[in-house]
Amino acid sequence: MTDSLQRSVKGTLPSQKHDQQIQVAIETYLQARSEILALGREVPERIGGNDNIIGRIGEFIGLRFLEALGQRPARVSGSANPGYDLVEGACRTQVKAITHENQRGRSVRLTPGWTQFLLMELGEHYTPDRIGLLTLEQQQQALGAGFAKTETPVVSLTMLSAKGLIGSYGRVYDREEIEALGI
């Protein structure tokens, strides 16, 4: 009898020690994903979109955050938006969420078309640790001052630091301020 056949006859391999726990976690994740997709079909104006679940979560948190600030944005329907995800009159908000799992703390480039940019750092349990808000006018000031080098920078968490683009020219809300807004 081969070694592998003997191991399968005797029981599980040492590497399979956590397989049951992994299977339960996968099933729980897929169930939650399924629920988000179903809610997206039921209330697309709140959490609709494509299959990018983190993007949907970010846009939902962004929607609630802006509502808490007194704005009344609406989600833009469709999966490919021209540089913004939320709209309220002439205010077009691009939302980017970067999770704690993103080791580089970077995302994609900003896409032109927005007048307000919302960047959030999602920590453990995908709750926002920091949310940064930058207007197009503030970005133009940073460009004029030579602080920003391009209109389409790569989005990164460094933007939220005290010396970052949003930290220097916009407004960064910390965890305590976000919680005080009910987010």
Image (cartoon, rainbow, N blue to C red):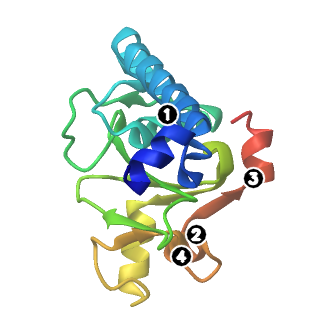
Give whichever of 178, 121 is nearer the camera. 121
Q: Judge the density around disc 2: few (<14), some (14-19), many (≥20) Cα neighbours within 10 Å.
A: many
Q: Which residue is mark 3?
A: 175
Q: Type of residue at label 3?
A: Arg
Q: Secondary structure at mark 1?
A: helix
- At x 38% / y 49%, what residue is drawn? 1
Which residue shows up at 34% across the image and 33% down it? 89
Question: Few, some or many C-alpha atoms within 10 Å of disc 3 (few <14, some 14-19, many ≥20)?
Answer: some
Residue carrying label 1: 26
Q: CA distance from mark 2 to mark 3?
A: 13 Å
Among the two numbered marks 4 and 1 on one chain, the one whose residue lies closer to the N terminus: 1
Q: Residue at x 72, y 46 (%)?
A: 178
Q: Amino acid at mark 2?
A: Leu
- Sequence-wise, which precedes: disc 3 or disc 1? 1
**Amino acid type of the residue that numbered disc 1 sits on in the rendered structure:** Ile
Marks 4,2: beta carbons within 8 A: yes
Q: Is residue 1 above or below residue 25?
A: below
Residue 116 appears at what percent x and percent y? 41, 52
Few, some or many residues within 10 Å of mark 1 (<14, 14–19, 20+): few
Q: Is residue 3 left or right of residue 69?
A: left
Q: Which mark is residue 158?
A: 4
The residue wearing badge 2 is 160
What's the CA distance linking mark 4 and mark 1? 32 Å
